Amino acid sequence: MIRELDDMRFDVIIKNGNIIDGAGNPYYRGDIGIHNGRIEKIGFLKNEQAGEIIDAADLAVCPGFIDVHSHSDAAVYFDNTLPSTIHQGITTSLLGNCGENLAPLAPETRQDYLKLYGVFAPPGLSFKAVPWNTFGEYLAYMEQHACVANAAHLVGFGTVRVAGGPGFEDRPPTLSEAKRMQSFVAEAMHAGAFGMSTGLIYAPQAYARTDEIISLAKVVAEYDGLYCSHIRGEGATVVDAVKEVIEITEKSGCRGGHIAHHKVAGRAYWGKSRETLHLMENANARGLSITCDQYPYSRGMTSMITLLPPWVHVGGLETLIARLKDPACRARIIDDVKHGLPGWENWIQDAGFEAIYIASVKTEKWRDIEGKSIGEITRLKGKTDEWETLFELLIDEGGEVTMTIELMGEEDIRRIMAARYTMIGTDAWGVNPSGVLGHGKPHPRYYGTFPRILGKYVREEGVLTLEDAVRRMTSFPAQRLGLTDRGLLKAGMWADIVIFDAEHVIDKATYLEPHQFPEGIMHVLVNGRIVVKNERQTGALPGKVLRRPA
């Protein structure tokens, strides 16, 4: 309800800004009045009073950025201030991507799953003591603990498969397991999940056939949810992998399908984005709803155990480490990488050891090699070859190593960025230059994704217009998620707002020095409260847990 304007006192007034409304319209000059967390008036508020006035002269004012591919569920449990995301202007994140999240958990498998998920935990910390089991209990816990920004959640297919199905085994579920998995998905959707995600290059999700996924996506469809996928292949099989997303979306009846961090990985396959984007266009033209997101970098990042063939992962992390200690298994791994396996994303073959870099480790023994390639480490450490380096590193670290890997070409990055159905996602979690989340050398996308789009690809290179880039960061993802009260600057909407210097905004993080905030994101508001003021966090924690609209 909009208040009468007589004798109004706003909580915050943003004055003199270049207002970019989020819908793609040209910007215009104006003021914004905020009360009780919402935008109450947009116009010229010459004589109105407010508890705080922000002078946005010569600055862009737009809706808060929505990160549709976040993994901050791996961070917020330890640090609710999420500095690397809020300094980018991210006011809402979609969590639970790539088929991995923190619920549901089953008593018989929870510790094995949380140990595997713990690769993302800071050194010395773990998720083993989390106090929930069901998805509803998980969201209730998050609601009770303040956070700097809003969070929406997906339920992860991999999490469900471990909790209720074949777990880490390479086989289809039994009938009773399938029904239990369906019940877990239904509970999550009823609790407020926005959909289900998959990460089909990761074990045990890689073991699932398409029909297994469709059976769970049909449950998602009953709640008008989304199917979001880190697809089964992003290199040689990328075209078939996009076709699988379309098939799952169509046969399940989900409201839409969404391709995570869409890319073409591996020099031999560069240019295939023409085919994948054509597939998406055709699917939308015949009545489906298929979208994607992207981060604007040529390297990817994930767990280093992903370099290993699928069979190595059967049985879970402890079994994997045992196999790495077995000379016969080592020989088989090397042979599989050299000759390939049908349908397997063979990154060592596609990129080479010189293009695979260590992002973070947990022990002091290997701390000095963070940021270096496996090839460089092999030479520095005097190892026999790169295989010896890889196996020793993974064994010493218990498999808990993250890496960045150079795989993508600039032509595909720009083509995907400009495509009609693309929005923006970090594929990262909140980190911090200091403290518990300040370890390692994470991918620079953790700090720079959104400012890099605005600086490099809008201002410097003109791949997108400013208004279109903002739309892809705000109203487009809000529309995708069904968030009708966020993503636009208009009266009645929640006041998630970013104020930035369009002439100077840029990312600063690099692969060797990643813990650097961007420049030019001046002020950020979440639900009407200022959380970043003059490029510094205020300490306010006004974020909300968002649930799927009924």
Image: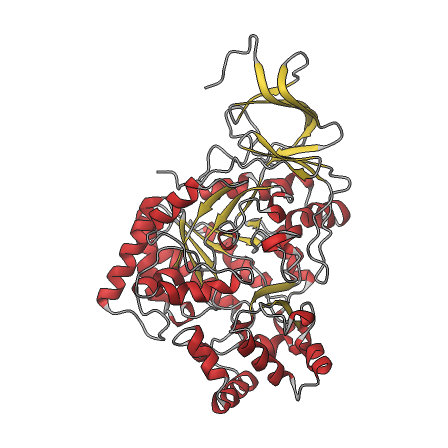
Relative to 364, say whether 2 is above or below.
above
Q: Is residue 467 left or right of residue 178?
A: right
Render colour scheme: secondary structure
Relative to 368, say whether 502 is above or below.
above
Q: Residue 244 appears at what percent x and percent y?
A: 43, 64
Residue sitting at the far left: 176
Instruction: Identify the residue at horizontal 54%, vertical 61% (top origin).
Output: 276
Instruction: Identify the residue at horizontal 57%, vertical 86% (top origin).
Output: 338
Is residue 182 visible in the rendered image? The answer is yes
Q: Residue 323 appears at what percent x and percent y?
A: 46, 83
Q: Residue 146 appears at what percent x and percent y?
A: 49, 40
Relative to 395, say whether 261 is above or below.
above
Quadrant of the drawing holding the C terminus: top left
Q: Residue 449 appears at what percent x and percent y?
A: 64, 51
Instruction: Identify the residue at horizontal 32%, vertical 52% (top origin).
Output: 134
Q: Nearer the viewer, residue 108 or 202?
A: 108
Relative to 36, say whether 82 is above or below.
below
Q: Nearer the viewer, residue 350 or 64?
A: 64
Q: Is residue 87 left or right of residue 327?
A: right
Q: How many marks?
A: 0
Instruction: Identify the residue at horizontal 50%, vertical 25% (top origin).
Output: 492
Is residue 463 visible in the rendered image? The answer is no
Quadrant of the drawing holding the N terminus: top left
